[in-house]
Amino acid sequence: MKLIPTILCGGAGSRLWPLSRSQHPKPFIKLNDGQSLLQKAFKRGLQQNDVAEVLTVTNRELLFKTEDEYRAINYQEVDTAFILEPFGKNTAAAIAAAVLNVIESHGRDAVLLVLAADHLIDNTESFREAVDTATELAAQGKLVTFGIKPTAPETGYGYIHAQGHEVLEFVEKPDLITAQEYVDSGQFLWNSGMFCFKAETMYEEMAKLCPDILGQVEKCLEQSQKVQGNKVRQIELNAKIFKHVAEAPIDIAVFEKSENIAVVPCDIGWSDIGSWVAMGELTTPDDNGNRIDGRAQLYDTRNCFIRSKNRLVGAVGLENVIIVDTADALLVAHGSKAQEVKHVYTELKKIDHESHKLHKTVYRPWGSFTVLEEGPHFKIKRIEVKPHSSLSLQMHHHRSEHWVVLKGEAQVVNGEQAMTIKRDQSTFIPAGHKHRLCNETDNPLVIIEVQTGKYVGEDDILRFEDNYGRCQ
């Protein structure tokens, strides 16, 4: 029986701001071992039996970043597929698209193992055993969810009231007293948001319980652009149709209504890394309970979490405080208010502040750029272009650019000229000139770009040719 690990990579991870942002969300956060949560989810899928393909549902703006993450660890060269959403519509729509795609590509008996892109599981062997059990139940026609044996009275999770593999009821996030009663009873499990089922079973249940969502997604897939490549498939969902899909979590749309549910209780060292408190627990505390990830000097400070990879943080007389420093934003919060960090993110999004969307380093299909400094009428960037990659042929109306090569060799189009620029050489591109930067070598290309003009915003760009389909 084919198994299709299906990774849902959506959401902003707003509780982990300022590290998590809308265009660099929580799944792409790298832990101290150098791997991102998304890479760990991908590896988790590959470790199961009978894997035919790894399917990912994500935002279309995150495709190239996701491909880069997978490429770095997909040593077995397992086939991959991507369903690209123009915007999020919650998990019912995402799973409907995955189910319909799997039926078309792998048949109705294929089993989907739905994984979140941003969870952490320490005990991979126990998880593999749980998946084997879930697969057996799925083969019997069950929709299977994974229930985590609770280690504390958490109020941030939904719970499953269970008896063996039987689900008695799903319950919403409780208050602390009720959560403690759940833990003490031994009959309740945390709802992990991971699932396993045959494609045919979920299709039939969605047709019965949420036919509008299934039907609209099916209509959308029929009108969506599909690309088949070497060991990779892509479907870009039609935005005009997808916007009409109702927004609902799969728990409410299907699992809480279905009479065909089973649960696999498991103890797998699971965490959804849902706050900075949970993130801090991944770091070993010092004698005063402080957890330091990066550079800090402390005095009379206890039970704090400090993350600062670049600047040195000094802390005096603090207790139970969270400090997270990035290149362009600093978070200071009391540990008891870790769940409330999302409100800062929400307010920044309301005013469209850059720090809710992007870091100083921004990733593009061709590589990345880092804003080193900016002010009125100027911006300075460090640009890195991957081997055999190219920026679009483009033009800016309001700014000129001066490029200096620091490393590698650049092939440049500047107006009517084509030229090669080597280390310590430069070129000046006036506003209104078509231009292009290419790296045709096997090594990274690094340049410094100095922009000057009356407007230096990223939206001052007109693309004429682009290898990544970004011309409008």
Image (cartoon, helix red, strand yellow):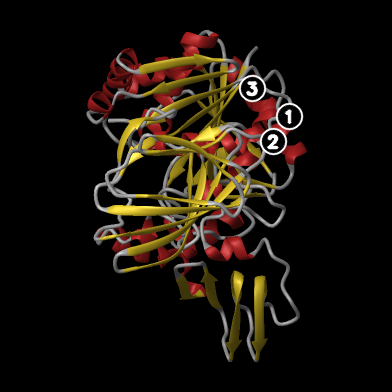
Q: Secondary structure at mark 3?
A: helix
Disc 3 residue type (three-letter): Thr
Classify 274 as above or below 167: below
Name the residue tied to disc 3.
135
In which quadrant is the C terminus drawn? top left
* 183 to the left or right of 362: right
Q: Nearer the viewer, residue 104 or 417?
A: 417
Label 3 neighbour load within 10 Å: few <14, some 14-19, many 20+:
many
- Write down the residue under mark 2: 73
Q: Earlier in the sequence, mark 1 or mark 3?
A: 1
Q: Cβ–Cβ below 8 Å for labels 3 and 2? A: no
Q: Nearer the viewer, residue 275 or 12?
A: 12
Local packing at callout 1 (Cα closer than 10 Å; few below 14, some 14-19, many 20+) is few
Q: Is residue 430 left or right of residue 160?
A: left
Residue 437 rendering spot, x and y as whole percentages: 47, 40
For the point 43% across and 29% down, the residue is 468
Question: Mark 3 or 2 closer to N-term?
Answer: 2
> CB atoms at circles 2 and 1 under 8 Å apart?
yes
Above or below, 374 relative to 25:
below
Distance in Å between CA atoms under marks 2 and 1: 6 Å
Inspect the image, locate mark 2, and give the three-letter code of the amino acid beneath it.
Ile
Quarter of the picture containing the N terminus is top right
Q: Residues within 10 Å of mark 2 (few under 14, many from 20)?
A: some
Query: Residue beneath label 1, please?
Result: 75
Give the Cα separation between the discs numbered 1 and 3: 25 Å
| In the foreground, 373 or 203 | 373
Mark 1 vs mark 3, foreground winner is 1
